[in-house]
Amino acid sequence: MKNTKELIVQKALELFNEKGIEYGGMRELAALLNMRVGNITYYFATKDDLVGELMNRLAEANTNTAKNYDLASLKGLLKMYREMFHNQYIYKCLFMSLVHLFTHHKGLVEQYKITEKKRKQRLADACKAMIDNGYLKQDADYNINGKIIAHVSLIARFWISESIVSYYDKSTEYVMCHYLNLISDEFLPYATSKGKKDIEAFLTEIT
Amino acid sequence: MKNTKELIVQKALELFNEKGIEYGGMRELAALLNMRVGNITYYFATKDDLVGELMNRLAEANTNTAKNYDLASLKGLLKMYREMFHNQYIYKCLFMSLVHLFTHHKGLVEQYKITEKKRKQRLADACKAMIDNGYLKQDADYNINGKIIAHVSLIARFWISESIVSYYDKSTEYVMCHYLNLISDEFLPYATSKGKKDIEAFLTEIT
DNA sequence: AAAAAATTTGGACATTGTCCAAATTCGTAT
DNA sequence: ATACGAATTTGGACAATGTCCAAATTTTTT
């Protein structure tokens, strides 16, 4: 049984994570695999298709992750983010080139829009559930959901980019912990005492 | 008097902002300027040098902007961010490729580290001054400065990236307003009533 | 064992950023 | 005004990129 396709995907992920998608060449990838370039294009007609495969796998990993946590509690939600951060790091090359992928990967824009909508909806639902369950304060003055979603989405999508720019000399563990702290911060001002306990418990758990 | 160099920089900025630095070619740029590629390389030996010129100009614009506002008040600080956002938008191509520039533009890493340090220091000083002046609460429990700096830095550097990914159909004004709101949010939990008034005044001013 | 299908090869193509010797234009001193 | 030297512009070459394809090879099916 041939598993050339799988070998290509794995080596591509290694190469792209190390050098960036745009700077890891098809010929270099082929050389690492002891094959000719045309052989890769047999499985993936274009480099974009190869990248698309990586995006699909990340999306699948994140979908699974979302299922495994209790999103009606702050601790559960934060734990989910921790696992999603790990997923994202495995496919970090995608986040190193997020803007490029969006502006030049026509097909994926539609796909990602759906994913993004789902994710925001999931977070919105979680916020509501956490208010009902007494983790977050009810507050008529502010659109809590909207604010939290906006802040958390930005962190979740660009923490890898910023870590490359600003924390390139720090360990992966340190960096993840830093940004999980930032996400926790976003909930803190709106957390009840019960919610604050959840956050503290989570933060001590990850350090 | 020849100003070929200036013409090149201006057209390059136009082209790169529209198509992205990596997708705006030297030949395309030359064609727009009715000149030959080699003529561009006479003034900028490499494409990186041309990009470096753009980075220098942005840095200079931001340095000037920082000088023109009273950073000891919340309103002054937020107004400074508004102007910096405009500066960044003028050079938006740089933010579309921030990660790439960092990983492949050796010389600029050192330069940006200095700029980043300055900016964080400026924000730290501003926070201290705003505490002294009664805009921000004194709070022994939290490292206010550190938190605010971390959150605001992330927004300030990646709002353009996210806007391309998520708000590509919205107007520039709308997007800027949105992210200035997010920055304001970061100060809100730590603001005194005096500080809150400043924030509200700023937010009504920009809408 | 033969035929068909799947896979792999090797090289072509247009495009990219970079580079350089020759041609041209420009400013200045005579 | 003219001639010289410096600054600028040209046109083409180079290696590297992603893409593409007909032919050769291997694997599977009949």
Image: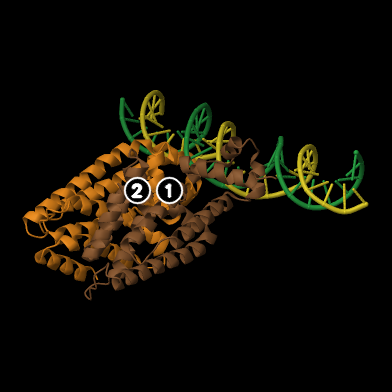
Chain colours: A orange, B brown, C yellow, D green
Q: Which residue is mark 2?
A: B176
Identify the residue at image location x=37%, y=66%: B123
Identify the residue at image location x=30%, y=57%: B183
Q: Is residue B87 left or right of residue D14?
A: left
Quarter of the image containing the N terminus of chain B? top right
Q: Is residue B165 visible?
A: no
* Helix, strand or loop at mark 1: helix
Of callouts 1 and 2, which one flags the residue occurring earlier in the amino acid sequence?
Answer: 1
Q: Chain of mark 1?
A: B
Q: Position of residue A141 (x, y in %)?
A: 14, 54
Identify the residue at image location x=17%, y=69%: A200
Q: In the rendered structure, are the residues bearing label 1 and label 2 in contact, judged by CB atoms less than 8 Å apart? A: yes
* Helix, strand or loop at mark 2: helix
In the orientation shown, which residue stands out farthest toward the bottom?
B140
Q: Is residue A195 above or below residue A20?
A: below
Mark 1: few/some/many CA within 10 Å (<14, 14-19, 20+)? some
Q: Position of residue B98 (x, y in %)?
A: 44, 53
Q: In the depicted view, which residue is nearer to us: B178 or D13?
A: B178
Q: In the depicted view, which residue is nearer to us: D22 or B134?
A: B134
Specify the label residue B89 is tagged with: 1
Q: Is residue B146 left or right of residue A21?
A: left
Q: Are marks 1 and 2 on the same chain?
A: yes
Q: Is residue A159 left or right of residue B22?
A: left
- Residue type, mark 1 in image: Tyr
